[in-house]
Image: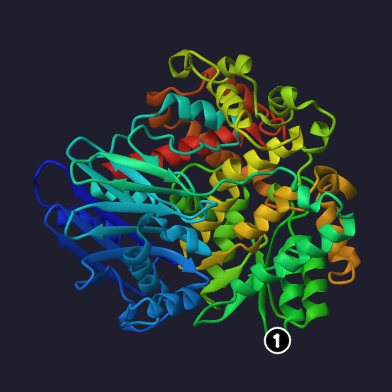
Amino acid sequence: MCGLAGELRLDGGRVDVAALDRMTSCLEHRGPDGSGVWARGPVGLGHRRLSIIDLSEQGAQPMVDPHLGLTVVFNGIIYNYKQLRAELQAAGHRFFSTSDTEVVLKAYAEWGAACVDSFLGMFAFAVVEHRTGRLVLARDRLGIKPMYIDARPDRIRFASTVQALLAGGGVDTSIDRTALAYYMTFHSVVPAPRTVLAGVRKLPPATVRVIEPDGTSRDTVYWRADFTRDESRSDWTSRDWEEALLDQLRVAVERRMVSDVPVGVLLSGGIDSSLVVALLAEKGQTGLATFSIGFESSGGESGDEFEYSTLVAQRFGTDHHRIAIDNSRLLPGIDAAVGAMSEPMVSHDCVAFYLLSQDVSQHVKVVQSGQGADEVLGGYDWYPPLADVPRDDAVEAYSRVFFDRRWTAMAEVLEPEWLVAKDSPTALITELFGQPGAQTAVDAALRNDTTIMLVDDPVKRVDNMTMAWGLEARVPFLDHEFVELAGRIPPELKLADGGKGVLKRAARGIVPDEVIDRPKGYFPVPAIRQLDGPYLERVREALTDPAAKRRGLFRPDMVERMLREPNVARTTLGSNALWQLALLEMWLQKVEDLAR
């Protein structure tokens, strides 16, 4: 895993190497093992390397092939790179490294932008064609690897993080009001291409953007999740689906062991990560390093799930690490986690992932995670209410159970100047639900959450927090072939047994029953869910800071009321509404500091 950056000048000037250096240096946490900058006339690329495949200098980036006239920077991993390498060698390509980066470079030379169709993995990359001056940007199917863009009339910059763009200078950091409406509606999610900052956009998942030297560009969307039934499987029983799902997950988990360094597992104690561990043990993996985290209890809420993670670790004989976080680390961890966010992310899981990654990175460079199963397989409690909803009524039904607040309630929180004229969140969901495919209301919700909400909340959360410590996180439940199969499964099989029924039943006899039958858990951080003491004071400080008052996002009467009763106002899904406001202000204040 790595960090990349780049600039394309559109005004006839040469690339600003000093700005590119600053952007690249800002990505050191994503790639502590090496760095490089390449510039050629109007275009330049920067890279920070985390060495996972081909640890030698031959795998360093930016990678230049003078014979092919190409330069590439790449973030991620191509799990089938060895197979593609053999195919490309048969086509006449000669390799000077054993890295997957060179496979990306040679694949582009052989197949052009269509090379992404052959890649099994998670990736963001940029390729420069020396002869034409063309710049090509690409992102993986599920958006696991990020790509942020700052486009102006005189130049285009791109990077793995918003902070790197800010380090380059000149970013428009004013607030995008439509994006703000999304943030306040979708649990802090701002779907691509927008971000909260008006001057920063992100390349959508499953997209290749070809940019000509004059700045004109064209996008190709190369993959879409279907979430419809497959007639060839119309006679399948529930057991057929369970076996097929388990077989595809075995493939996905095995793929993610491809590495030149050891691979561990983030073991929460839930069924998803426990099944990953079980399948690795089934393949004969021994001495597997597993990691779980716990916090001090607060407000009557338990702060750890060690009971279940320890049970799984003992069952499969892993080298298990229980990481207990006392409150002395939590408060500074909050600010550090906010500083690591490329976009404001309201989930308290961010702090857990940040602190967990800090400790895990002392042991391994790569981990597998169970992230994504809930969105793909119907594990959340807002899916069952959609089960009997007619497809034409899906937008309204989904909005009732998922939106943090409806459009009519937005004015209760935001000051009038920050309100946009129309109900843009509902308009967006209407557009997304109206796309072809997704036969039922549940299918439409699962497709939306897998390809939109998952990308810009759980997946982004894991990438930002693990990469803050140079730790690569791999997510087998987001293997695109696994997602394609899951999309075909009838919704009633997913919603069975309180959610993820098809996975729970497939896991019987493989994962301990206690893990399957336990109540659904999350990375619990009680001190944030139940704000009190120094955590409440940090929230108060953020919302009453002079910068917050100058910005004037939120109605003062609402802020005062929520500060008096910090744990009363909850979103539709039970999150702390005060934390949602404070987190945005904390992040914006960090942006102000970086942009100075």
Residue at 52 percent across and 20 percent down: it is 414
Residue at 60 percent across and 50 percent down: it is 458
Res. 270 visible in picture? no
In the figure, is residue 589 to the left or right of 298? left
Q: Quadrant of residue 285?
A: bottom right
Query: Residue 225: percent from the left, percent from the top?
Result: 61, 46
Q: Amino acid at mark 1?
A: Thr
How is colour applied across the structure in the image? rainbow
For label 1, the residue is 286
Q: Is residue 573 above or below residue 123?
A: above
Q: Nearer the viewer, residue 374 or 116?
A: 116
Q: Quadrant of residue 26?
A: bottom left
What residue occupies the far left of the structure in this picture?
13
Residue at 62 percent across and 28 percent down: it is 434
Query: Residue 461: percent from the left, percent from the top?
Result: 55, 52
Q: Is residue 185 above or below residue 13?
A: above
User: What secondary structure is found at the residue carrying circle 1?
Assistant: loop
Q: Where, quadrant-wise, is the N terminus in this rendering?
A: bottom left
Q: Nearer the viewer, residue 551 or 573?
A: 573
Res. 404 visible in picture? yes
